[in-house]
Amino acid sequence: MEGNKYSIKADFTLMAMMLIPIAIAINILGGQIAAALKLPIYVDTIGTLLIAILAGPWVGALTGLLSNLINGIFDPVFIPYAMVSIAVGLVAGYLSRAKMFNSIGKMIISGIILGLTAAIISSPITAFMFGGVTGSGSTLITGVFLAAGQSLLKSVITTSIITDLADKIISIAFCFFIIKSISIRYLSKFSLGTHFTKKRA
Amino acid sequence: MAGDNILKLNPLTKITFAICLSISVFFADYPYALGCFIVLCFIAGFYRILKDYLIMLLKTLFIIIIFMFILQALFYPGHEIVWQWKFISIKQEGLMYALSLSSKILVIGGSILLFFKTTHVKDLVSSLEQVGLSPAFAYVILSTLQIIPQMEKRSRQIMDAQRSRGVETEGNLLSRAKAFIPSLGPLILSSIVGTEERAITLEARAFSAPVKKVRAHVVKETPTDKWLRILFISLLILFMIWRVVLWII
Amino acid sequence: MDYLIEIQQVTYQYPTGEKPVLQDVSFQIKKGEFCAIIGPNGSGKTTLCNAIRGFIPHFYKGELHGDVRINGKSIKDQTVGELSLQVGFVFQNPFSQISGVSETVFEEIRFGLENLGIDTVVAEKRVDEVMKLTKITHLQDRNPFELSGGQLQRVALASIIVMEPDILVIDEPTSQLDPEGTEEVFEIIRLMKEKQKTIILVEHKMELIAEYADHIILIDDGKVILNGNNEEILTNEKVLEHNTLLPQYAMLGLELRKHGVNLDRIPVTEKQAKEELTKWFAQEGQIYV
Ligand SMILES: Nc1ncnc2c1ncn2[C@@H]1O[C@H](COP(=O)(O)OP(=O)(O)OP(=O)(O)O)[C@@H](O)[C@H]1O
Ligand SMILES: [Mg+2]
């Protein structure tokens, strides 16, 4: 019916707009709960991934941007990393348009692509803006690579590839369970939601 | 009192200041940046929030800065060794690099923090809406600010309920990871189900009525605001020209 | 006769539904009329309200066969935004009827007026009046997120009334209220009727419908089963066949008739019941004394 044509405007439905605040809150809460449970990964992009998968790349990008800006009110370190969240939103949205979240195998590939995207964009920020330091325990891993004689950028990239891959694959698995539990009635309200309704009877 | 006047500046004026100051530190060395940071502290003092401000800086930026000093001092490639113990050595170049970087972080992060400590986000959004931000966008930001504490509250209730039901929120990694799903999943699902009715609510309140909205909450814009913004921007441009010229010569 | 609202052979199926939720629904509502829609759970009452407000088909999508006309103009030719100027809509769940951007009840009620572009001074006066009318002035500085269901139901009603639409569509406004709160809400709705508003109300509390409604429509399984004036419908035993109650006075009347008590008419309100019984006692009561 809708064919394969997508437009930015068509993605920004009222429903998508109403979901943005919730997605941002999910990002922030996910991060908080992961921290409270002392999990070794951030899980602070679940909301961005979820909304990008359902409502497309630009809604995802906007959600990512706003999440980091709002976190930045209390901790400005988040603000430069908005670039990463925007990229994650965009890439996840385009992957979803290409139906790359419709099977376990494709989801793992998507997770790897997203993990690499996040690592490639966040590393220069960490290395050149913050001298290799992040606010988390991963700084220690960076230190280990540095001590082993690697360059700063290389150490940071290696560190973030490890953490981001794990983070994105786990986050996508979580999104998968959430999307599976959303009833067709609500899924169909989002521009890409129909990708997930057809297989169900 | 002068302090009262400053408090009433338009958010756009304050943000112009923060942005100009942040850009300027890229055109000078760390003594300038440290000077800027002292100015920020003075402004915070003017608003009578210096203590709060410093505590917030301590909790966010200082930690990163300290780690950065350690990392850079140890691993920055350099020759001038300041201090050595067995195979660990601290190098002058690393310290200087860390100092230069952290003074910039302090000014940029410090201006952002100061801006938000002295400005309600609501005022910022209103002032942006007054210069053309779309109402839908403004709505998204404002409702996000309202929804976050609501969802935090509900998530805390859910986690407490889980603990009392014996779901392990401590213990080994796997059981903690498992606790994550029931902590967040139901909250997400119920929120998504609610979006449809919230969209209808918005329509019922004439959000997309074909008329121009009138906002009751208006942020004042005085001539002082206009002149200050022009001043900040011209000072920045002059400063940049001066530094570039110096650099070329 | 000109009708304000005309529903013409409406058949509608939700895009994700399996069968039509409304089937060949037709009826008309006059200006200033108080029309109650009754029927069992899941019969399509809310769906019908959504069609009158234009959320069907504009928001819910799906194909709408037939037509809904308001003031002679099809809802298909109007946007949801344009319709918001004419039709006010209060729906079932009070907890999701919060704009989400207001810090106080006062701001919440004013939100609609901001969107209508009403001058701030006028708007605040109107908000004050409506809060008095709906008896929520004491809540004006509270955060809407912290109110009870009953309080929210009144805030939701107030937020729509303040916008002064000509037509009010109200879907089960008393589900979260105790009997006293319910009476108060009906009192507000009655005042709206006095102001010549056209009212469409979905409600299960039949005694109150008997008291206030002019026109009643019974729907079941997406079809109009009965359509007539208050007494016609509320004395019709057929209503009971559709899992819908009648007012207790009508039930009493029908029951008495079955036992050979010859009432002139079946009462639907308390007042009528008293009248009828007194009359009957006066005529035949002595026989038994
Ligand atoms: N958005 C939707 N998408 C798909 N089906 C829906 C939707 N909303 C309602 N339905 C279905 O349409 C039918 C009629 O629902 P509707 O809500 O109109 O009934 P109702 O008379 O208002 O019921 P109640 O008394 O419980 O409020 C039900 O079977 C319901 O499951
Ligand atoms: Mg209903």
Image: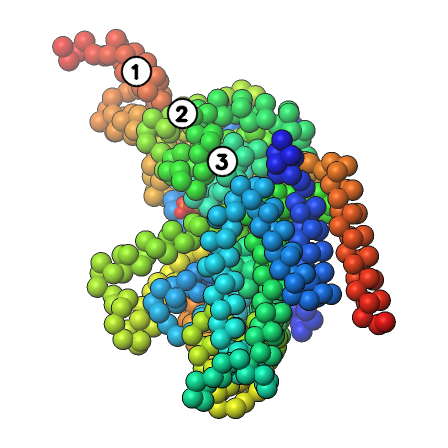
Residue B155 against residue C71 in the figure, above or below: below
Question: Marks 3 and 1, how far apart in space?
Answer: 46 Å
Residue nearest the viewer, comparing C203 with B67: B67
Is mark 3 in CB contact (under 8 Å) with mark 1? no
Residue for badge 1: C274
Residue nearest the viewer, comparing C255 with C274: C274
Percent from the top left, x then y, of residue B241?
83, 62
Q: Chain of mark 1?
A: C
**Residue type of the residue flagged with mark 2:** Glu
Whether residue C288 is visible to the viewer of this picture, yes or no, is yes
Residue B98 against residue C97 in the figure, above or below: below
Question: Marks 1 and 2, how far apart in space?
Answer: 23 Å
**Residue type of the residue flagged with mark 3:** Thr
Using the rendered view, name the quadrant where residue C233 is placed.
top left
Q: Nearer the viewer, mark 1 or mark 2?
A: 2
Find residue C184 and name its label.
Answer: 2
Residue for badge 3: C104
Question: Marks 2 and 3, how far apart in space?
Answer: 23 Å
Q: Chain of mark 3?
A: C
Other residues around mark 3 within 10 Å, as few (<14) / some (14–19) / many (≥20): some
- Helix, strand or loop under label 2: helix
Q: Chain of mark 2?
A: C
Q: Nearer the viewer, mark 2 or mark 3?
A: 3
Query: Residue at the location (36% across, 22% down)?
Result: C269
